[in-house]
Amino acid sequence: MNIDGDTLNARFSIGQVVKHRLFPFRGVIYDVDPEFANTEEWYQAIPAHIRPRKDQPFYHLLAENDEGYYEAYVSEQNLLIDDTGLPVEHPSIPDMFGELEDGFYRHAPGLGH
C-alpha cells in the first residue's frame, strides 16, 4: 500500500476476513487508515493495559459476534487471519462485496475503492 508517497506495509487487505486477537468477533475489512485516525476520546476509552500503539495501520471492519452486527475499528496488532472459511453475515457485505473466495471477499461489480 502506498499512502502519500510513504510506503506502508499493511498486513491485511480490503475484503479479507479477520478476527480479533483478544475479543470474540470477526469481520471483513472495508477500509484501512495508515495510522490511528479516530477520536482521542475513543482511544482513551480503551483500557490502558490493552491500548494499541497509534503508529500502525487501523482497519475498519464489518464485524459480527454472537450478539449481532456492527462496525469495528481495530489496530493491526489486534487482528489475526480468520481461517475458518466461513462467510461473515454482516448485512452490509452485499452492498460492498461480491463472493467470498479463499478468505477474501471480491469487490462487488461496479464498486471501486
Image (cartoon, rainbow, N blue to C red):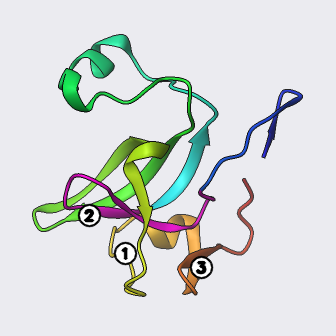
Image-quadrant location for residue 73: top left
Callout 2 touching callout 3 (CB < 8 Å): no
Task: Give the spatial CA distance, label 2 vs label 3.
Answer: 18 Å
Earlier sequence position, callout 1 versus callout 2? 2
Along the horizontal axis of the image, is 12 left or right of 53? right
| Residue 24 part of the magenta segment | yes
Amino acid at the residue labelled 3: Gly
Q: Is residue 113 above or below residue 108?
A: above
Residue at which label 2 appears: 64
**SS at badge 3:** strand
> Which numbered marker is on residue 98?
3
Pointer 2 or 3: first along the chain: 2
User: Does residue 31 appear left or right of residue 19 in this picture?
Assistant: right
Query: Farthest residue toward the top?
Result: 40
Give the residue drawn at x 39%, y 82%: 87
Tell me the kind of residue under disc 2. Glu
Is-magenta flag for residue 26? yes
Camera-side residue: 66 or 54? 54
* Residue bearing the label numbered 1: 88
Other residues around mark 3 within 10 Å, as few (<14) / some (14–19) / many (≥20): some
Percent across and percent down for residue 85 are 42, 87
Could you tell whether 69 is left or right of 19 in the image? left
Q: Amino acid at mark 1?
A: Val
Whether 96 is drawn above or below 37: the answer is: below
Boundaries of the magenta span: 12-27
Q: Residue at x 36, y 12 (%)?
A: 40
Q: Residue at x 59, y 79 (%)?
A: 98
